[in-house]
Image (cartoon, helix red, strand yellow):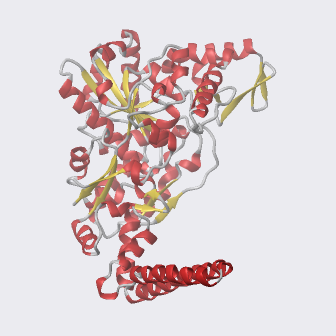
Amino acid sequence: MPEIPLFKNFYKNPILIDLFQVESKLKNLHNGLELSFIDIDFLKKRDISKDQRYTLYNVLSEQYSNCGLEIPKNLKSIKNRGVFTITTGHQLCAFGGPQYFIHKIISVIKIAENLKVKYKEFDFIPMFWMASEDHDFQEISSLNIFNQNLSVNQKDSIGVGKLKPEIFSPILEELKEIFKNDSRFNYLESIFSSALNQSNWSNATRYWVNEIFKNQNLLIIDADDSRLKKIFLPIFQKELEQQFIHSSVEKTNNLIKGKGFTPKINPRKLNLFYLDDNQRHRIVLENEVFKISNREFSKEQILRELNSSPEKFSPNVLMRPLYQESILPNLIYVGGPSEIVYWTQLKSSFQEVTINYPILTLRDHFFWINRKTLSKWKDLGFSIEDLSKEPDELLKSFFLNLSSNSIDLKNEKQLLNQLSVLLLKKAKSIDKSLIPSVEGSIKAIKSNLDKIQGKFLHASKKGEEQKVNQIKKISGLIHQNGKLKERSESFIADFVKNQDIYMEKLKASSNSENNSLKIIVY
């Protein structure tokens, strides 16, 4: 299977690159980035109490039943010691949003299967954590397909999991119009239509994700539940009383800065939200007063509110990882590049409240390309790795290598260099003061040569317009403006075209420890 290295070609974040170096300056900020860091001792230390396991079972059972879905066969095993989760999470994007939504889930499924082969006496459950409490509607309100943006508009409000699914009906109608002449879309249309009949967007997302990944042993959790938050209540309380996230992350950020890097996230003084019927409000602490919208609480009052109604408190981006790891028997968190970076800011926060910190793994990256398009790419004289290059660089390389119409001025530039030596030697023999003038003239000639080469290139482009368009089109399939298309384009088109082999191909290609873009040829 063809692959393109990620760090060499697509990701430039200095912290991310350093983390995956053998001699990483930041290696103490995590517990390892490879499965080899998991051994029997690691497994035994990640277990959770029987009561907590039963709570998980009860919550998940109810959530599936509320969607009209069968309770997954492997859910019962969550009650048993020696059963662990491999977790990823994402926002509840409209019908998946960007296709890496799917790639994250594939990664946890494959890792769980691989660990089961290695540790037969244990069980491993791939887990998808729905970011149902996130209230940023703009980030979930659209999807891109065939370079079209399908979106709906609404103001931010309560956690998106509580939204009415019919809000997203216009997007499904647009998808139906796009695929009106393609019966292969009927399967997805049926799933999405049924999802929109659910009572809220969290249930709708669970429904369609469950259907897409049925028979893959995936469990889907919505942690916006009072029973789960009750488990986390002591950590909520510590944050309200001591603001430990801020102090611990600040120390880590200073360490990161001391190593010559810039931290991704600067912590707020208090890292909690408050949920009411219509809004998710940031809790602001000023002069020992806790402010929530136009309400104010003393410390005693806010703690009473927490103890009576823990479900009203919601972790922000820095506290959510601690919530996740406190309620799940989790071994590995599979995240995108930005997630991996900010998780490394949190290890000291985990230690502050004695919560197990997981192994971090960068999610899989995939790109689908048909054989005809790949063959055309190679006929143009390019390699697989050339797919990572920007169009301007590709075009320059293409025209420089055209044997039938060479625009390479290498020989002419060599002659100019030889002439320069002779002219400077003659100027020196006549009058040394002539040297600056001669050098300036030579520099001007070299500049004019570059302009001439540019004109040759422009003329060649006009004569090879069809090939220019092919290069731009194929390059644009994989990335645009320096950003991988799997970070913007929906999975739907590739799924429709490859429905019978889609899951099989992704799983066969999955290897999250190999930090590369996997090219799936069909």
Foreground residue, 95 or 405?
Answer: 405
Q: Is residue 304 above or below residue 372?
A: above
Which residue is pictured at 48% across the width and 32% down the height? 25
> For the view shown, which residue lies furthest in the right direction?
287
Q: Is residue 310 visible?
A: yes
Q: Is residue 174 above or below residue 511?
A: below
Q: Is residue 328 left or right of residue 3?
A: right
Foreground residue, 402 or 158?
Answer: 402
Report x, y in % for residue 337.
Answer: 45, 42
Q: Is residue 466 left or right of residue 123?
A: right
The image shows a total of numbered marks equal to 0
Q: Is residue 496 above or below residue 455?
A: above
Which residue is pictured at 29% across the width and 27% down the height? 36
Report x, y in % for residue 307.
Answer: 62, 13
Image quarter of residue 319: top right
| Quadrant placement of the C terminus | bottom left
Q: Is residue 127 above or below residue 103?
A: above
Which residue is pictured at 55% across the width and 15% down the height? 352
Q: Is residue 6 left or right of residue 496?
A: right
Report x, y in % for residue 380.
Answer: 29, 75
Foreground residue, 159 or 504?
Answer: 504
